[in-house]
Image (cartoon, rainbow, N blue to C red):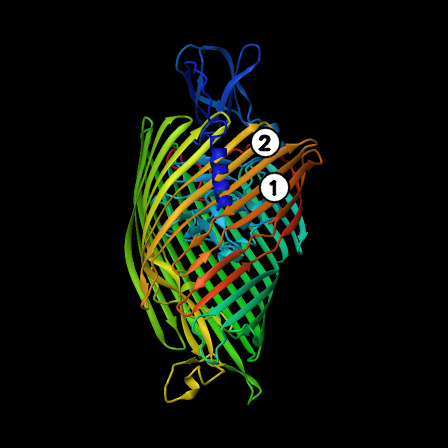
Amino acid sequence: MKKNIFLFIFSLFILNLGATNTTNPIEKIALTGKVVDKDTKQPLEYATIVIKSLDGKIITGGITDAKGEFNIQVVKGVYDISVEFISFKTKTFKSKEISGNTDLDTITLEVDAQTLNEVVVIAEKSTVEIRLDKKIYNVGKDMTVKGGTASDVLDNVPSVSVDVEGNVSLRGSENVRILINGKPSGLVGMSSTDALRQLPADAIEKVEVITSPSARYDAEGTAGILNIILRKGKAIGFNGSVSASAGIPDNYGLSANLNYRTNKANYFASGGYNYRNAPGSSKSAVTYLFPSVNQPKYRNETTDYDRKNDSYNARFGTEYFLTDKTSLTGTILYRESDGEDLSTNTSKEYDANKILTRTNKRVEIENEKDITKEYALNFMHDFNKDGHKLTLDFQYENSIENSNAFISDSNPERNSTDNETKNILIKGDYVLPIGENSQFEFGFNTDLNKLNADYLVEEFNDSTNQFENNTNFSNTLDFEQNVYAVYSQYGNKVNKFSYLLGLRMENTDRKISLLQTNENFDKNFTEFFPTVNLGLEFSDSESVTLGYNRRLSRPRHWFLNPFESRTSQTYVRTGNVNLDPTYTNAFDLGYLKRWEKLTLNSSVYYQHAINNIEMAQKEEWRDPKGNTIIYDPLNPDTDPEQNPDLTLVIITTPINLSSQDRYGFEFTTNYSPLKWWKITNSFNFFKSVTSGDYNGINYDSENVSWFTRLNSRISLPGGIDWQTSGMYMGPSESARSKRKAMVSLNLAFSKDILKEKGTLALNVSDLLNTRKRESTDYSPTTIAENEFQWRKRQVMLNFTYRFNQKKKPQRQERDENGGGDDGMFGG
């Protein structure tokens, strides 16, 4: 408890550092204007305005926003004003007298052809952009993710956490939608957890955290949306980077990002290879509250995991400029992984006096091969008016997962899973500016998904000396889910006040067929999803936002699939074909304040969910072949008191509970106490109240939890950067389980070499080896103490070499990726 209080006070201490400047303000006036590209007339975001005294001393300055506009407060006087942007010629206003509010109007910058052909620029540090409905985190020089994966990147983004199994949460909820370049993608795959661990961190340019999505986005994901934007070069000529990494436990990787751009086309490619050995372990200590005569009082299980995986991914694309305002982009993605997992499960049973009565060893060897192919086509046309554009997308994905497992114990078993998915996405978005500050938008989305899952379980028959099909578990599932959507939204800005109002309609047609049992489970439903996003700017350094949205979370196919996991004889997981979507109504109130050395970004949020999905447990007795045994007083073989071969099996399955209320508070602060020291702190406190009953068992619960993350970056002598990242996740509780708190610490050092063309980075993930989930599960007849560690401490050495690149702020260009420049609305 004392540790929790200390960490909470420390988070608040970071928040208040440097925010107490009480000097008397000097009356200032506004210097405004807009910076655009002379040739394309496109606004230049991040252009720098420098205001100097006539003797050359820098007085103040600023940068342009997504519309190329700037508003700088300055005292009256005569100044030299320069407008600068990477790869453009600087424009200077000499001896400019500023005696009142001054508008420099539209400033055109001309491309510096010589500079543009020499270098392309990349982000040196992580920055954040705030829009009405989202926050955009540009992934910069975060050393703790060098040589890492997309999971490592997400685990360093404020509001986002990744647990020990790789499950991604937003504000403590796992009901989050993950997109790649604004669309569902094969880079996320059928199992987003595994796929995110195979996507190299170096391929990611930025992450959009969308906690109050506008109507443009899918209604899927009750907690919100994470949109991962991949890198794509923007400068003339050939440029790129290559990265190599090696680590302990065995972890080797090689990746590259290449780009070649001419006046008519942009060719981009990225790819990588990774070999990873991720040893892990789990423990379970079960106490039976009411054991039968032949049942143990205690059972301890340990499972050791040895996971080896070879993964490859390649992405090729061409962006062809049909005209100055029209482009066509084609992309091909190929991803392949070969995995070999060895799970060794040892079970020991004890009587009431804790005397060992039985030992069983269960070894599972699983080989899995996954192949994903994805083809995407994007058409974008900018009309003559700034912001007036049409975007069309087509995407086809085919994914295959084949796995074969052999389980050896007292009852040897073989099982295989063959999954194939085919997904088609067709979408369009049309944006029409109305006047200077208004915007109308209309769009449609068709998402067609098909999955075939063939699951075969074979058990060894002693009498025939052969493996035979166990029809109790083998089955074939056909899953089809088609979603059809249309939306419209309107936004406007009146002085300092902005609003974005939208409505989305989605029709879902879901069909599930279990072929062996000839069972069909079909659902079709149409829902409306309104969105409201409001914003008020008190000044350039202070603003407040308010958002409302209605969303849903459709159960994924692995939640619906009734096939059981087979790693343990006594603990199994199975799906539920009758699951309904979860629906939420969410409110979000945000506040942003910038001081000279400190930035505060905070939110208060509330969500009310119905049909909330939770994991429930049931118990049943089974014979050695896995058949469910129903007690018959006339048959002694069905009586656990008389048949010692029967085993009590605990089955975990997802169910729809009646409702859940979640509310919380979060903040993120960026503080630079000294030029060589940067600190980022994020804190999230939340409470959930769940109510519902299942099979006569009450699942009402209240859970109060919080987590905080602290990143410190220090520039040491000799050009060495030192980064420390600490995370604390508070304890949590549900109706039938309690999870203990978890602490994790990452450490990294880096140095630029080879005239800043290369970077050498050393990072240690989970320095204290404490990233473990420790929990206690309760059922009517058992109490289980559990511990799980997916990956042990890891040390990585990474080298990155850049050619024709420099490390400076990067200009933003036209973006077909579902993010980027959308002006004040950012929808």
* Residue 638 vertical placement versus 575 (above, below): below
Residue, far front: 353
Residue 686 is situated, as x and y percent measured from the top left of the image, at 40, 46
Res 143 label? 1
Of 668 and 260, the residue lying toward us? 668
x 37%, y 89%: residue: 634
Of 204 and 691, the residue lying toward us? 691
Q: Toward which corner of the image does residue 782 lie, by quadrant? A: bottom left
Q: Quadrant of the C terminus?
A: top left
Q: Are marks 1 and 2 in contact (CB under 8 Å)?
A: no
Residue 161 is situated, as x and y percent measured from the top left of the image, at 49, 48
How many other residues sit within 10 Å of disc 2, few (<14), some (14-19) or many (≥20)? some
Label 1 element class: helix
Q: Amino acid at mark 2?
A: Trp
Residue 121 is situated, as x and y percent measured from the top left of the image, at 58, 34
- In the rendered image, which residue does mark 2 sit on? 677
Q: Amino acid at mark 1?
A: Met
Q: Is residue 717 left or right of residue 648?
A: right
Label 2 element class: strand
Mark toward the start of the polypeptide (1 vs 2): 1
Q: Toward which corner of the image does residue 512 lie, by quadrant? A: bottom left
x 50%, y 21%: residue: 61
* Residue 289 vertical placement versus 525 (above, below): below
Q: Tell me if residue 136 can be seen.
A: yes
How many other residues sit within 10 Å of disc 1, few (<14), some (14-19) or many (≥20)? many
Task: Report, in whole angstroms, how far the alpha carbon at label 1 lies from the one at label 2.
Answer: 15 Å
Residue 725 is situated, as x and y percent measured from the top left of the image, at 57, 42
* Residue 436 vertical placement versus 702 (above, below): above
Q: Tell me if residue 321 can be seen.
A: no
